[in-house]
Amino acid sequence: MSLTLTCPICGKRNGYEFRYGGEDKGPRPEEEGLTPRSWCDYVHMNKCVAGVQKEWWFHRDGCGSWFTTYRNTVTNLEVEGPEAKE
Amino acid sequence: MFGKYKPLWGEKTRLKSSYDAVIIGGGLHGLATAYFLAKEHGMKNVAIIEKNFIGFGGAGRNTAIVRANQRTQINVPLYKEALDLWPVLTKDLDFNLMFNNCGNLNLMHSEAAMNAARMNIATAQFHGVESHLLDAKQVKEMVPALNISPDITYPIHGAMYHPPGGIVRHDAVVWGLAKGAVKLGAEIHQQTEATAIHTENGKITGVETSRGKIHTPRVLVSAGGYSAGIISQMLGVKLPISVLTIQAMVTQPLKPILNHVVSSGAYHCYANQTLKGEIATGAHMDPWPNYTTLTTAYYIKHQAQALSEFLPCLRGIKFMRHWGGLADMTPDMAPIMDGNDPIDGFYMNCGWGYFGFKSCSSTGKYLAEYMATGSCPDILKPFNLRRYERHELMGETAALVNYSPDN
Ligand SMILES: Cc1cc2nc3c(=O)[nH]c(=O)nc-3n(C[C@H](O)[C@H](O)[C@H](O)COP(=O)(O)OP(=O)(O)OC[C@H]3O[C@@H](n4cnc5c(N)ncnc54)[C@H](O)[C@@H]3O)c2cc1C
Ligand SMILES: [Zn+2]
């Protein structure tokens, strides 16, 4: 189940160099009018998709970049996102 | 496996078009719930819908460790009842579950850890669960194979010793419960995948399966690592869960050397000797969500390194088999059991991560009560989903696990 990820700066690297940063949930919600439920939604709740998801990664043992990428959680392979196809 | 053979629990039956309750997932928790629904509440018109075969999930992949020395007052009573139930179930199901209460030794590698253990032990003793603190010398006397020398990465300072825990044969639990549930009237439908859950005006009305539609007012999602994906995809209810693959492995068989379950948080490793003589060991997971259940060379190496430090007599021993399964992790390392919120008749039982084998009996019993009466038994109330938005996380872990980042 080897994983490789493409860092925007360092290129394709071994997955163990990175730290997973969670499902992409869009922008952080505005503080104004924020309810415990919507904050909890942002902080804790996941879709747990069996398939392709957009997610955050941190190049911990590398350049320190945070970036998003697409990965298929069933095959554990990084895949091209919809943006790339446009 | 399916062909001409008759299942252990009896003849195959036709899938009906309506049931009083449908249970999605033929794992430990689903089977236990069906068993207790029939046994204690007379609810027998129940179908267990299993996508593959019973025991396909964590039920058939776990390392079978049972114990009741958890961290919080909320969790301990549920696990204690489960531990006390093994001999009772063995008798009631008339099926040898091979409960080997050899005791668990949880190694401590610092004085801070020893203090944390004192706290854990006090909680256990308060709830009538036997648990003691041992120093390094006592640990060595109990398990001579352990290395208590100070020159290893994480020297052993002592251990939390929990005599009533041990190992239960996991496949026997699956078979015993399946047989028991069907004998009392429940139906098991293998090779039947739930594909949608139907609701109307906030109430459950049925389940769509790969073999047709079922009408029912009650659905329990008890699909182990697949639950969070199912619930989010079919009902739009998101859960605070990350699904990771956890691995385990066994060595070649050896003469008896280890008569306890030994575990170490610092080494991220546990080990026990099976009745066949293999050392069963595991604990780690690749820290990114995935549904592959594939194994990695990375962890064979990790496991070999850890074991050769604290059980040095295992150096050079070969691993024979290595496998993976899913662990659905919550941020507080405690499960989510809830019902009728936000949909009437919808029940869920998930977030059991890598520790949901030991609890299946008591959980099944209380979930059955919940589903039969519609009201939540007190013991399950704290495990509701809304605890996360109320910021009432359970603290089953000293440090917040974040399987998203780090770890
Ligand atoms: C390697 C490993 C080691 C472990 N070690 C321990 C241990 O030592 N002690 C301990 O207490 N716990 C341990 N666990 C955890 C334990 O195995 C799980 O918590 C437990 O199996 C959960 O039980 P369950 O009944 O909820 O789910 P499972 O046993 O996983 O069963 C879920 C079932 O749902 C089915 N399913 C999925 N999707 C669908 C669908 N759409 N329709 C119909 N059916 C579906 C699956 O096929 C599966 O059979 C371990 C787990 C693993 C993987
Ligand atoms: Zn980089």
Image (tube, helix red, strand yellow):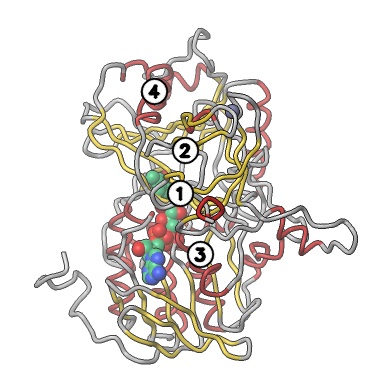
Kind of residue sitting beneath label 2: Asp
Q: Position of residue B369 (x, y in %)?
A: 53, 77
Q: Which residue is mark 4?
A: B307
B258 and B20: which one is in front?
B20
Indicate which disc, 1 or 3, sits on the residue closer to the N terminus.
1
Read off the chain for label 1.
Answer: B
Separation of residues labelled 1 and 3 (CA atoms): 26 Å
Disc 1 to disc 3: CB gap under 8 Å: no
Q: Earlier in the sequence, mark 3 or mark 4?
A: 4
The amino acid marked with disc number 3 is Thr
Q: Are marks 2 and 3 on the same chain?
A: yes
Please identify, in this view, whether the residue under mark 3 or under mark 4 is nearer the observer: 4
Q: Is residue B201 left or right of residue B95?
A: right
The residue marked by circle 2 belongs to what chain? B
Q: Is residue B85 in sight in this rendering?
A: no
- Specify the subunit that label 4 lies on: B
Where residue B236 appears, as percent x and y from the top left, is 59, 72
